[in-house]
Image (cartoon, rainbow, N blue to C red):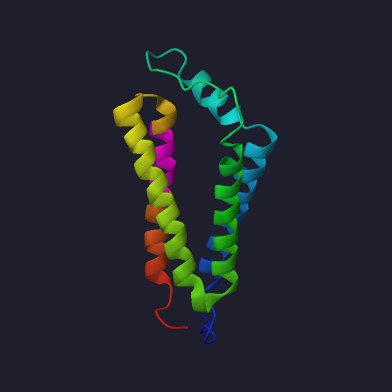
Amino acid sequence: MSELKPGSLSKGIQWSLELMAMAYVAVAVLFLVNPDLVILVVNKAFVGFDWPMVFFPTERFWLSLAVSVPATRACLAFAAARRPAEARTFVSILSVSLLVAAIVFAWQFVFHKHAPLYALAFLVEFVQVIFYYFLKKKLPLEV
């Protein structure tokens, strides 16, 4: 196995960050093209259960945030992959974004409505928090 050049990330870490960035781009495009799709799919998956559903918004006020948040996360992940010296900072910012979202989804599930969409969203965000926690441990302290 070859040693890393100073100022570089391992290929596995770089690939992981780039893959996550591409996933965030896909989510941003999904929300831009069909913002109701996620709600529709999750509601249909749980239609046979006695769980409350999340209804479609009548306005598109939140669409800008639904697109800009994953777009910003994509930029942070791509930047972390391309700029090893600042990778820890970019991953930390990404983690804060994910943790705040996870907490808000958990709060909505517990205190607002026990809808499976909130539980699933919490799980997706929290898994990413854990992913970045372990990835950050593998990042070099000083590049």
Q: Position of residue 143 (x, y in %)?
A: 47, 83
**Residue drawn 53% across the image and 61% down it:** 16
Q: Main secondary structure of the magenta part?
A: helix
- Horizontal side of 76 relative to 122 (left or right) equals right
On screen, residue 3 above or below 44 = below
Residue 82 visible in the displayed image:
yes
**Residue 40 found in image quarter:** top right
On screen, residue 58 above or below 48 = below
**Residue drawn 61% across the image and 42% down it:** 64
Residue 23 visible in the displayed image:
no
The outermost residue toward the right is 33
On screen, residue 119 above or below 6 = above
State the extent of the magenta-drawn residues as a range.
Answer: 119-127
Residue 138: say if magenta: no
Frontmost residue, 93 versus 10:
93
**Residue drawn 52% across the image and 19% down it:** 44
The outermost residue toward the left is 110
- Horizontal side of 121 relative to 7 (left or right) equals left
Frontmost residue, 13 versus 106:
106
- Horizontal side of 23 relative to 109 (left or right) equals right
**Residue drawn 43% across the image and 50% down it:** 98
| Figure label count | 0
Q: Position of residue 122 (x, y in %)?
A: 39, 39
The outermost residue toward the bottom is 6
Q: Position of residue 55 (x, y in %)?
A: 51, 20
